Amino acid sequence: MADNTNTGTFPGEVHNTPGGGVLVSKLDDVINWARSNSLWPLVFGTSCCAIEMMSTASAKYDWSRFGFEVARATPRQADVIIIAGTIVNKMAPVLKRLYDQMADPKYVIAMGACATSGGPFFYNTYSVVKGADHVIPVDVYIAGCPPRPEALLHAMITLQEKIRSGLTREQIKMQKPEQSF
Amino acid sequence: MTNEELKIKATELVPSATFEEGGEWLTAQIDPGNWLSLARELHNNAELAFDYLFCLTCIDFKTHLTMVYHLTSTTYRHTLVIKSKLNRDTPEIETVSHLWRTAEFHEREAYELFGVNFLHHPDLRLLILPDGWEGRNPMRKDYEDPINIIKL
C-alpha cells in the first residue's frame, strides 16, 4: 500500500472492480487525515507574534487553505493553541488552564523566540517564562522574532504531517532519521 | 505657549527650577517639595491648562530615583516635562491623582516597580504584580532574583 503519511491526499487505495471499486484504507489513517485537515486554532496571542498570526489568517496568506480558518475564542472548541508571544509568570497558570480546557487530541505550536525559549527576555528578566514548554508540551517550534507568516504556515503544515504520521511525541523521538517524516 | 514662554512662567512658579533644553519639549528639574504646588498651578491656571498627564514614570539612576511627568494641554497644545530627583532610600513625593485621574494607576505602577511612596494617594497598592511583591521592586537596578533571573 502506498505510504500516504507525507501528503494531504486521502490515505487509501482504490481497487477497480467491475461495476465500481473498493477502497482499502486503515481507519486510524483516515481519522488522522481528517483531523489534520481541520485544525481549529484558539484565539490566543500575547504579543507581537499575534500580529503576524493575524496576518497569516488574513487574505494575503490565508491559512484557511490548510484548514485552519475556524479560529475559536473558547479552548473547549479548539484543537490547536498557537502560543503567539511572550509568556510571563503571571500568564503561565492561565495558559495551563486554557490547555487543560481543550479537548483531546490537542496540539501546541510555540511561535517565535519568546514562546520557544524566552527569546530576547532570556537574560535579566524577573517576569518571563523561559519557554512555554515549561508550562505545556509543545509539538512544533518556530524560530523568528517574530516569525514571518510563511514560517507559521510551514509550522502548521509540519503539525499536519505529524498528525498524519499518527505517531506520538515519544515515538517520533525514538525514530531513526531515515524513517522520520 | 512656546517653550521660552513656558520657561519664564515655570520660573515664576518655582524660582529654584532648572531647565534642560535642546529636545522637542522643555524639561524642568524641580525639588519634590515644590511638586504639589506647581502641579496644582499647571493644572488650574487658565493660561497653562495642562489638562493631560500623558506619561508618568520613574528612572533608577543607582544614586537616586527620578520621577518624570509629561504634561500637555489639549487647549494650547504645549507640552512640559517635569523631572524630580528622589532620595533612593526613602523615595517620597506628593500624589497628583486628584489633579490628573490617570496618575492614580500610574503611581501604583511606579510604587510597585520602583517603591516610590506617593503621599496622600487614595489607594496605593500593587497594580499588576501578584500579591506578595510588596517591598520587592523589580525595576530597581540592584534588584536580585536568583530563581527567575539569568544574569548576563
Image: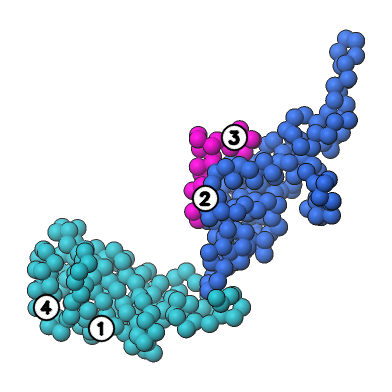
Chain colours: A blue, B cyan
Amino acid type, callout 2: Ala
The disc placed on residue A127 is none
Label 4 Cα crowd, 10 Å radius (few <14 / some 14-19 / many 20+): some
Residue at the farthest front position = A178
* Chain to which the residue tagged by mark 3 belongs: A
**Which residue in the protein does label 4 denote?**
B11
* Chain to which the residue tagged by mark 1 belongs: B
Task: Give the structural element (helix, strand or loop) at label 3.
Answer: helix
Residue at the farthest bottom position = B89
Task: Give the structural element (helix, strand or loop) at label 1.
Answer: helix
- Earlier in the chain: of badge 4 and badge 1, it is 4
The disc placed on residue A50 is 2
Give left or right: position of A163 versus B64: right
Q: Which residues are magenta?
A: A47-69
Return the residue nearer the eye: A94 or A118: A118
Residue A101 visible in the snapshot: no
Instruction: Say if labels 2 and 1 share a chain.
Output: no
Residue visible at 53% across and 72% down in the picture: A125
Task: Give the structural element (helix, strand or loop) at label 4.
Answer: helix
- Point out residue A132 in the picture as x, y percentages from the top left corner: 63, 61
**Which residue in the protein does label 3 denote?**
A64
Instruction: Say if labels 4 and 1 share a chain.
Output: yes
Tell me the CA gap for discs 4 and 1. 15 Å
Amino acid type, callout 3: Ser
Task: Give the structural element (helix, strand or loop) at label 2.
Answer: helix
**Which residue in the protein does label 1 denote?**
B32
Compared with residue B43, is residue A69 higher up or lower down, i.e. above or below?
above
